[in-house]
Amino acid sequence: MRLSGKTAIVTGAASGIGAGIARRFVAEGARVLIADVNLVAATALARELGAAATPVGVDVADRDSVAALAAAANAALGEIDILVNNAGIGHVPQALEDLAEDEFERVFAVNARSIYLTARAFVPAMKARRRGTILNIASTAGVSPRPRLTWYNASKGWVITATRSMAVELAPFGIRVNAINPVASETPLLATFMGSDTPQTRERFLASIPLGRFATPEDMANTATFLCSDEAGMITGVALEVDGGRCI
């Protein structure tokens, strides 16, 4: 029960890594807002998790939608202790000059602009209380970029730099900000990153991970729970690789 009495928002929480984090947070005693663009899936997960979970529909790239999320969070949970910026998208591997402009803008809107918007929505109250924890889900792509994913790599590099800068600026207010850099995980985005999900592409990708397996939502949930708990009270500005050794 390391998060007993805590309140948390997890974006992109209806599936994949976000769902893993939400499940673990509830198991550790937190009350959690399951925030996702797919309200049907968010509602189903909240029903599974019980009274400690509340579903909310949100487009994290839209200012008005994030403002509505803040209002819903205040009504459902009151003060917010933990904000997990997990929502993210990728793009199919392709030459950097071939990615359509609207797709480029959507990648940066969901992966980068969303963190700006949630910061505007939730940081002022955290500053006033002089406490809070923010966790951004970045990627090993921001540390060890792969070819043909240039703009996704760049968006996650932005997340890592933003995390470190937020940590320095918000430390005097008692707010910790960290990031997790997952390696490719068994989530709906896996096929997007690899281009196709075949035994051959899996074998090639797994060859780059020394521990020899993809990450799981549970791996990320374990790390997120620690970084958002009081046990990590002296840790801020960290972008932690959870990658089976891929970035070595």
Image (tube, rainbow, N blue to C red):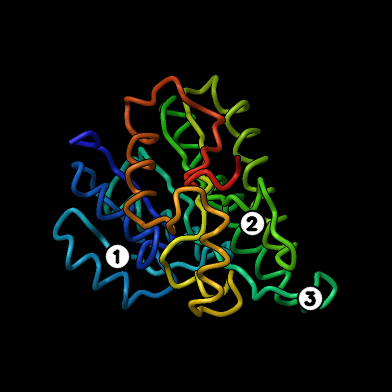
Pick out the residue farthest to the left. 50
- Decide which of tag 1 and tag 3 comes sooner along the chain: 1
Checking the image for residue 166, the label placed there is none
Residue labelled with disc 3: 101
Q: Between marks 2 and 3, how big is the CA–CA gap? A: 16 Å
Q: Quadrant of residue 15?
A: bottom left
Front-most of 229 and 62? Answer: 229
Q: Name the amino acid, label 2.
A: Arg
Checking the image for residue 113, the label placed there is 2
Question: Residue 214: x, y in percent?
Answer: 44, 59
- For label 2, the SS is helix
Whether the residues at callouts 2 and 1 have beta carbons within 8 Å, the answer is no
Q: Name the amino acid, label 1.
A: Pro
Question: Residue 161: x, y in percent?
Answer: 67, 40
Front-most of 104 and 132? Answer: 104
Q: Quadrant of residue 99?
A: bottom right
Residue labelled with disc 1: 55
Residue at horizontal 38%, vertical 41%? 223
Residue at horizontal 56%, vertical 50%? 138
161 left or right, relative to 80: right
- Decide which of tag 2 and tag 3 comes sooner along the chain: 3
177 left or right, relative to 33: right
- For label 1, the SS is strand
Q: Name the amino acid, label 3.
A: Glu
State the quadrant of the N terminus. top left
Residue at horizontal 44%, vertical 73%? 188
Front-most of 67 and 165? Answer: 165
